[in-house]
Structures are given as structure tokens and as C-alpha cells.
Amino acid sequence: MLDIADELNRWLEEGRDFAVATVVAVSGSAPRGPGAALAVDADGTAIGSVSGGCVEGAVYDLCTRALTDGKAVRERFGYSDEDAFAVGLTCGGVLDILVTPVPADGPDRKVLQTALSAAVRGEAAALARVVRGSAELLGRALTVRHDGSCEGEFGGHPDLDRAVADKARSLLDAGRTGAFDIAQDGSRCEPDVTVLVESSVPPPRMLVFGAIDFAAALVRVGRFLGYHVTVCDARPVFATRTRFPEADDIVVDWPHRYLQRTRTDDRTVVCVLTHDAKFDVPLLETALRLPAAYIGAMGSRRTHEERDRRLRDIGLTEVELTRLRSPIGLDLGARTPEETALSIAAEIVAARHGGTGLPLSDSHTPIHHDTDAHRPEVISASDRVTRPRADRQGARTP
């Protein structure tokens, strides 16, 4: 749900009634992961997506029904030869989707607004919702802030509230979205409730060193990918707002000195575009010893070899040097700054999700490499969907 926080928060502020459908479990190949959402208001306006088009029509109908009857429902969509093009997933995967009405006087409306407004502001917050359980619990929500304070309750289950809040806080601290099973009394014994936690955390940082034309293109791509982008260069004549209007921050400082004092974590991306040894070497010496998801450096293969020698001479280990991606980017045959930025961005995305960088047409690996890592529930082969039918909670099961 937090992936459409801007629009949903506006709907809440405008007092609209709406229903929201959220992907809560994925098995096999599916276009969207847990947390992806589609919402429909009372006028029939739709925002978001749960499947990239495969089942949007059926989910839209479920949302309009939920607006009418006021009931939360969980549905399962999967593939079969007979109905795949009607309401199934042609990619062969299985989606479990929770549809929840959010009327103007709903008990969880304020809870949702707390989480959505935090996401809009780029603040840390976790939204925990019951996605499997009794009718009274299904769809109920709890928002947990970074300081541990909470908004909402599951309705007469204080032990469950406390246990879910603790687990949601740990997932928030890790910046993860995921699901877990728990009992209504808050224990792990005979769990009869599944809770999905969506974490909203500040955007990851992209640090671009070198105020050159390639950097301007990379800034635009970085912002498109959702990074908070900082451009740093020691030359004030080049590091200007006029040259980088889309950068979040522009810093005039020696690159290694700025990197030593700024915040980095295991989501940070470092792109070194200076390809000048007096900047590169001290900067990479610092970068390769800090937490970061990706560290890449621009330059020819000859430049890379010379830079590698200098880094070894000042004491960097083989393990530290293996973190460096140089020359930066994937081999796309890029020539222009925009093409080069695309090449770098493609390598960043591949590194983030474990992609190979090879053409999918020549690869036999799964398209979505992180499906298992983000799967809230394990659906066994015996759970494979053939023809949908409704169970007691409205789930479409085999």
C-alpha cells in the first residue's frame, strides 16, 4: 500500500471512501511483489497496480464490491490453461491479494493515514496488517514509528498488539517488507494469524562524485529510480545548481573528505566519475572501507589497471578491491551521457537484485531474482491454482 502513498494520503485528506487491494503473498513468477497495491474510490477512480495488468480487472471488481458490502476479503489468483486470460496470471505465478474497504468512518482510517503521511514525508514507519485470520481481524492495521510508538490496535487483543509491534519494529529497522505467522495471544504456538508488515524508510542515497556531463544524466536516472542524489566535486565552478538542477544536494568539497563525514549505509550507491587519480584514489580508499550497496568508478581499462595498482600500494586488500565495479556500468555499447547513465543504472539494479546483466532471451534464470526473499508465505506445489473458487474468507483456492 505504501507504494501509492502520495495518492492514498490525498484521498484520506479529501475524505474519500475507497477500497485498497494489496499483494500479500507471491509464489512463482509474478510481476509485483508483496506490498504492491491498487485502490478504487467510490467514484470508480483507480490508482496503482497489483499485477501489471494480468488480474487488474478482477481486482477492480473486488474493490468495488468491498466498497458496497464493507467486508475485507482475501483472494488468490493463479494460472490455468482454461482461465489464465480471464482472471489468472499468464506468467504462471500465484498472487494472494487482500482487499480492504476504507470508509470515512472506518476504525483504521487514522492508522493508515499515519503510515501513509510518514511515507509521503520520507520518514520511517511500518504498517502492519492482518492478512490471514478471523473475520474480525482480517484487514485490521497497526502503524509503528521508528521510536517504537504505535497507532491503532487489533481490537481486544493487547498481547497480539505488543507482539506485532515488536516484530514490525525489527522489520522497520532492517528496512524490510515481509510477513510472519503468529497466534492471537501473541505467541508463536499454533499461529492462526498472518501479518504483513510494509516498511517505509527514507530513500537510499546515491553519491555522485565528479560534476561532469555524465553526472548530470546519472542524477536524472538516480532520481527516477528513487534515490536521494548528491553531487560532490572540489571545483565550485562545476558543482552548481545551474548544472545539476535535479540533484537533491550539491556539495563543494574534496570527495574523500566529504565521504568521510557523510552518512552511508548498506543501501548507499557510490558512483565515482572523476577518473582523476588525485580524486579517485583517496576517495575509493575511503569508499571501499565503508558500508555501501554499490561502488563503481568510471575510466578506461588502462585507467582501471593503474588505479587498481595505486589502491593496492596504499594497502587495500583483495577482499576490499573485489567490491569495486570498474569500469563502471554494464556493456551496452553506451556512448552518450544518457546511454552511459543507463548502463550504470542497469548495473546498480542488477547488483541490488542479483541479476546477471545478460539478455533474458539468452538466460534460463528466474526473471525476478528476489521473489523468494520477499515471499511472505510458502505455497507448496499442492497449492498450485487451477480454477478459482471462493473459500470461507473469499480466497480463490484450488
Image (tube, rainbow, N blue to C red):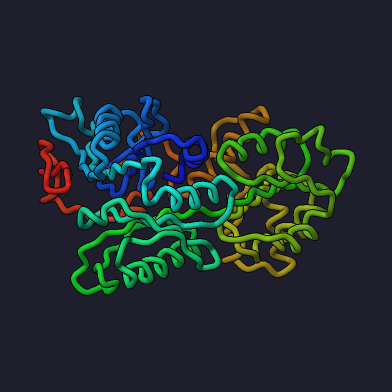
Relative image position of residue 255 (x, y in whole percent): 78, 54
The quadrant in which the C terminus is found is top left
| Residue 54 in sight in this render | no
Q: Residue at x 80, y 60 (%)?
A: 257
- Return the residue found at the far front: 105
Q: Position of residue 221 (x, y in %)?
A: 61, 36
Q: Please give left or right for residue 362 compared with residue 267 in the image.
A: left
> Camera-side residue: 326 or 384?
384
Position of residue 320 relative to residue 105, above or below, is below
Q: Tell me the quarter of the picture where residue 64 sits.
A: top left
Residue closest to the far right = 237
Relative to 252, is 176 on the left or the right? left
Kindly identify the residue that appears in the image at 23 percent across and 31 percent down. 90
Quadrant in the rendering for residue 65: top left
Identify the residue at horizontal 64%, vertical 64% (top origin): 290
Image quarter in which the N terminus is found: top left
Q: Is residue 371 visible?
A: yes
Residue nearer the viewer, 222 or 106: 106
Is 129 rendered above or below residue 21? below
Q: Is residue 313 left or right of residue 204?
A: right
User: Position of 98 compared to 318: left or right?
Assistant: left
Foreground of the two, 389 or 109: 109
Residue 191 image offset from top left, x and y in percent: 21, 67
Residue lying at 31% horizontally and 49% vertically, measured from the top left: 24
Residue 323 x, y percent position in the rendering:
58, 58
Q: How many marks?
A: 0
